[in-house]
Amino acid sequence: MKAHPRCAPCLLARVHYEAALSTDDPELQQRAIQAGIRWLNESFSINTPATYISTEIHRRAYEVLGDEDPYVTKKKMSNEIALKLLPMAEEMVTSTKDDAFRRSVIASIAGNTFDFGVLGFEPEEQFDAYFMDMFKKGLDVDDTDKMKVLLDDVLYLTDNCGEIVFDGLVLDQIKGLGGKVTLAVKGAPILTDATLEDAEETGVGKKADRVLTTGSNAVGIDLNEAPNELKEALKNASLIISKGMANYEALSEYDFGPIAYLLRAKCEPIATSLGIKKGWNVAILHI
């Protein structure tokens, strides 16, 4: 997916958010924002992949801040909140055996709400109630039945911390249906994205047959920075499950498939690109 004009103010707002997380020094916050503005001035174009622009703006902000992971506290809190909610979510998923895979997908998309700094939402303030509302809402686009026949050898690309806990419910269902799962997490911290450390601390990594990383902190996935193992997994998977908007932005630039995009459309450009409405919860299969 290419950048949209609306991406620019959204990215700057995210830079301001992470700068405020990192430091109370307004001058340092200003320098981080200025670095973002310079990058947008130099490189922003609607003909450029959105994830390239977002990766580089955050890398520049992190460099100015001297902070490898401004979201570290938020990420740990997300995992803790999600783990406390997990027993209830497991019961909700398994309450109807014949529908458990679809229900696990709904739970994982409800978990996609864990995205600090997006649209002013702070998940710790209301997540339990919000999760329940999202689960009851279900899916606005539901291709889960089509996905179930493609679960032999799945590559599962994770998104945020906290959310990864509920991704584990999907992994449970895939394994229960006889499939294999390769889990892919970020190679280094960026935004609230889950890393190898998060996969280990939440126990989700143990549910997979194999755990790989994207090789870097690129937003979404950048094949120029990805290890060969991951490239091979992308080529050979019976189904790629792509969680969240950034992975959609990235993978839509490549020619892999089939891909199941599991996400909540939190912004208009993503919704328009997918041909859906903002705010929809979707499990869309692209062959």
Image (cartoon, rainbow, N blue to C red):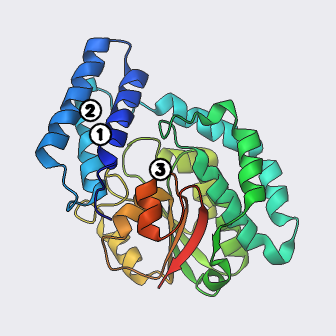
The residue positioned 47% from the left and 50% from the top of the image is 196
User: Of 112 and 208, which appears nearest the observer?
Assistant: 112
Which residue shows up at 75% across the image and 40% down it?
128
Q: Residue at x 56, y 36 (%)?
A: 121
Residue 32 in the image: above or below residue 186: above
Q: Check disc 3 and report the residue beneath it.
A: 196
Image quadrant for the N terminus? Answer: bottom left
Q: Is the residue under label 2 in contact with that under label 1 (CB below 8 Å)?
A: yes
Q: In the rendering, at what x and y percent does residue 119 appear?
A: 49, 39
Q: Which mark is residue 177?
A: none
Position of 219 relative to 21 (above/below): below
Question: Eyeballing the image, is 35 above or below 170?
Answer: above
Residue 140 in view (yes/no): yes
Give SS at disc 3: helix
Give, as a three-letter code, the residue at label 2.
Ala
Q: Label 1, on which residue?
A: 58
Q: Which-is-in-front pick, marks 3 and 1?
A: 1
The disc labelled 1 sits on which kind of residue? His
Residue 123: image x %, image y %? 62, 37
In the picture of the structure, the residue carrying the numbered disc 2 is: 61
Counting other residues with Cα less than 10 Å from the Cα at mark 3, is it few (<14), some (14-19), or many (20 or more)? some
**Quadrant in the picture for residue 35:** top left
Nearer-N-terminus badge (2/3): 2
Rendering quarter of residue 231: bottom left
Left or right side of 158 for 78 = right
What amino acid type should be assigned to the residue bearing mark 3? Leu
Q: Position of residue 247 (x, y in %)?
A: 42, 61
- x and y percentages locating residue 9 in the rendered image: 32, 39
Q: Secondary structure at mark 2?
A: helix
Q: CA distance from mark 3 to mark 1?
A: 20 Å
Secondary element under disc 1, as helix, strand or loop, is helix
